[in-house]
Amino acid sequence: MPATPAWPPSSLPRLYVEAPLAQGAAIQLEAGPANYLANVLRLRAGAEVKLFDDRSGEWLAEVVETGRKKISLAVTAHLRPREPVPDLWLLFAPIKRGRIDWLVEKATELGVARIVPVLTERTVVERLNLERLRAHSIEAAEQCERTALPQLAEPVRIDALLSQWPLERQLYFADESGGPPLASAVQAGPAALLIGPEGGFTDAERSAIGSLKQAQPVSLGPRILRADTAAVAAVSLWMAAAGDWSDAPRRKRDGSIAD
Ligand code: SAM
């Protein structure tokens, strides 16, 4: 007996929309998203897509009308609520353009709640195009089936960050000069991971971080990792130990969630 095909098919196009979604809502898409659905995927009236708005979860919508520069959709069904997001912040000293885009994409896929660029003494990149980074984060969320977008914060200087540190949040700072392995240091509760610049933290920064009661230096192993590698390794270790990887749903071959 052939297996009942998943509904809706996980292969449906999936888009983030700013507009609030609700049963029966009429959604107009223009520019990039409209071009993607109408001209790249060549969707026509009656075709289905999945939408999410970072507030109410994921919805099914049907194409009502396609124009050259815009497309109209009608929301037909609520598929699932906005997922709970593991309470993890990723703080990192900005790195070169291509690699920072990659890092934001990976941090989104891995499930972080907040992404914070931190300006340190040896940070080489000061100016960031947050709009471009947000676009990368949205695209990653569309692909990895997140219904919640990570917050992308404005860059902050490390001294300002430390002076306003929230009491309840543990700060694991990745310190290549040593510390307990992150995997064994992780405790449950709100957390943040701090990754230094390619040139590393200065001694003054290291002692300022170390003087924070919630701060714990941690090691990511014996080798000196590049900053983007260190960030992905650290987030993965935290997600496996205290995040939502242990309760990941079992998926069938067609990508849908198994009963
Ligand atoms: N300062 C270092 C140097 O040039 O000798 C390298 C800095 S490393 C390229 C960039 C950042 O990645 C570090 O500041 C640290 O936060 C993190 N990192 C890299 N390897 C690490 C390790 N083995 N343990 C903990 N953190 C590490």
Image: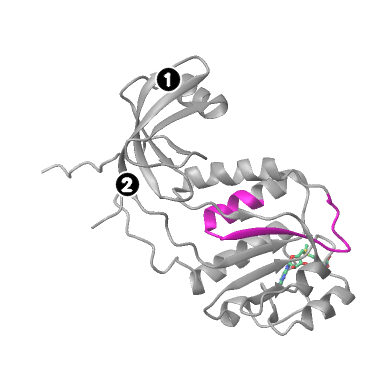
Tell me if label 1 and label 2 are in contact, CB under 8 Å. no
Please state which amino acid type lies under the numbered disc 1. Arg
* Callout 1 secondary element: loop
| Horizontal and vertical percent position of residue 158 | 81, 67
Compared to residue 244, the image places residue 105 above or below, namely above
Highlighted range, magenta? 103-126
Residue 110 among magenta residues? yes
Frontmost residue, 81 versus 146: 81
Tag 1 residue? 42
Q: Which mark is residue 79?
A: 2
How far across and down, in percent of the image, does residue 87 sit?
54, 68
Kind of element beneath mark 2: strand
Left of 38 or right of it: where is 233?
right
Task: Work out which residue is located at the far top of the displayed protein and give it.
Answer: 68
The foreground one among 106 and 112 is 112
Check the image and report above or below for 96 versus 49. below
The residue at the point 74 percent across, 43 percent down is: 129
In this rendering, is residue 88 above or below 150?
Answer: below
The percent coordinates of residue 191 (x first, y second) are 60, 73
